[in-house]
Amino acid sequence: MVTIHVNPDSCTRCGICAIVCPMGIVSAPGEQILPGVPDAASALCIRCGHCEAYCPAQALLLCDRADEKVWIPQGAGSVNPQDLGIYMRKRRSVRNYRDDPVPAEKVREVLDIARYAATGGCGQPVEWTVVLDRARVRRIAELTIEWLKTLRDSDHPMRGVIPVLVGAWESGRDVICRDAPHLLFAHIPEENPVAFIDAVIALTYFDIAAPAHGIGTCWAGFVAMAAAAHAPLRKEINLPAGRKVAYAMMFGYPRYAVYGIPPRKPLAVTWL
């Protein structure tokens, strides 16, 4: 099984591909020998693409989905550190949304970025359910309130805030989804012990990339908890068999712009 393809005319035999391979299966090149992956080691390849990404000459292609090769234009992808710092510091949890919906194609663009998020062993276990229908978002919020009501007389850690949440909902305020037009669910295999972290990383990618596309986000903690415990809500989300919700995020076009960056707690670091 051929794992990588190396262009003999472009390869400089620098050996970086062999050095950066996390599995150590790319053989080092020689003066007259191209790098490669022995057939016996091919099954160990995790398709991370390090060999391809770090090739200075871009002479190497990972054969797995080679048609998806993304060429980086000269000078593209560099971000000024100051601009990046401001961009990330001004990120806000958006709880006030405009009425106009985000087109599905724009959501797809942001999710296409999120699929490049780091995953353990390059397992890429995260898949997505996007709720574009506003009425369905409302129904999910209703089912979340329904679940919260079942906890009133329990010893659940949230029992103290449940009356406040239910009271606000019954007075006409959506304190669950904040009248967001859309919801995003990251879901993972039920039996994968590390996939939850992969999903949080992928959702963070979506969260960070979304404002560049004009989209505001807010992590939907109440919905995520209800999705893990309330069968009617799981049925409403209708995930594929064998998968579970890792977490949820509300999103839409922000009603208001951000003009300032409020303070945060001082940086706390222990240096060893």
Image: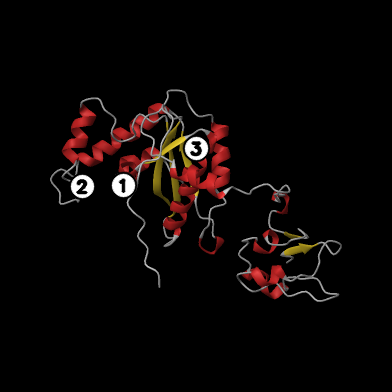
Q: In the displayed structure, does residue 166 sit left or right of residue 40?
A: left
Residues at circles 2 and 1 in contact by the CB criterion of under 8 Å: yes
Location of residue 226 with respect to 135 vertically, above or below: below
Q: Nearer the viewer, residue 19 or 127?
A: 19
The image shows residue 203 at horizontal and vertical percentages of: 46, 47
N-term mark: 3 or 1: 3
The quarter of the displayed image where residue 91 is located: top left
- Determine the residue located farthest toward the left in the rendered image: 153
The image shows residue 224 at horizontal and vertical percentages of: 34, 45
| Location of mark 3 (residue) | 211
Cα–Cα gap, marks 2 and 1:
11 Å
Number of the front mark, 2 or 1: 2
| Location of mark 2 (residue) | 158
Residue drawn 39% across the image and 47% down it? 247
The image shows residue 258 at horizontal and vertical percentages of: 43, 33
Q: Is residue 163 visible?
A: yes
Number of the front mark, 3 or 1: 3
